[in-house]
Image (spheres, rainbow, N blue to C red):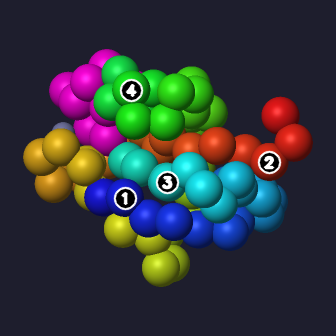
Amino acid sequence: MEQMMKSIYIEGKEVELQEEFPVRFACMEHFDQELDEYVNDYEVAPDTYAAQAVEAEAVNKRCRACGEPGKIVLLREKGL
Ligand SMILES: [Zn+2]
């Protein structure tokens, strides 16, 4: 799924996000495809983390491509 968020909790720490870029999840099968699409859509390389490091409340972690549980999150952090 794709969500626009101000910040997200990763490993218990609040990470501020660049709000103009979405938070997307991908399963292992679609990770390469989602990485390519993020770069194509936004002309930036996303930061990536294991989906299990992201706190689940209010976040839909399903793969954007197939709807299976996502394993990797793609996002853009502020200040990097
Ligand atoms: Zn998938």
Of the pair 66 and 69, the residue shown nearer to us:
66
User: What segment carries the magenta color?
Assistant: 26-35
Write down the residue under mark 3.
23
Mark 4 neighbour class, 10 Å CA radius: few under 14, some 14 to 19, many 20 or more: few
The picture quadrant for ligand 1 comes to top left
Q: Are marks 1 and 3 in contact (CB under 8 Å)?
A: yes
Please name which of the two marks, 4 or 2, marks the residue nearer to the observer.
4
Judged from the image, the secondary structure of the residue bearing numbered disc 3 is: strand
Question: Is the distance from the Cβ of mark 3 to the nearest ligand 1 atom less than 8 Å?
Answer: no
Q: Which numbered disc, 4 or 1, marks the residue that appears first in the sequence? A: 1
Q: Which numbered disc, 2 or 3, marks the residue that appears first in the sequence? A: 3
Write down the residue under mark 2.
78
Mark 2 to mark 3 CA distance (whole Å) = 13 Å
Q: Visible in this render: residue 50?
A: no
Task: Name the quadrant containing residue 14.
Answer: bottom right
Q: Which numbered disc, 1 or 3, marks the residue that appears first in the sequence? A: 1
Taking the image as shown, residue 19 lies to the left or right of residue 14, namely: left
Count the labels in the image: 4
Q: Are marks 4 and 1 in contact (CB under 8 Å)?
A: no
Mark 2 neighbour class, 10 Å CA radius: few under 14, some 14 to 19, many 20 or more: few
Judged from the image, the secondary structure of the residue bearing numbered disc 1 is: strand
Q: Quadrant of the C terminus?
A: top right
Write down the residue under mark 4.
40
At a point 12% along the width and 46% down the height, the residue shown is: 66
Picture coordinates of residue 12, whole percent (x, y): 74, 62
Write down the residue under mark 1.
2
At a point 50% along the width and 78% down the height, the residue shown is: 57
Judged from the image, the secondary structure of the residue bearing numbered disc 4 is: helix
Q: Which kind of residue does numbered mark 2 sit on? A: Lys
Mark 4 to mark 2 CA distance (whole Å) = 20 Å
Of the pair 32 and 36, the residue shown nearer to us:
36
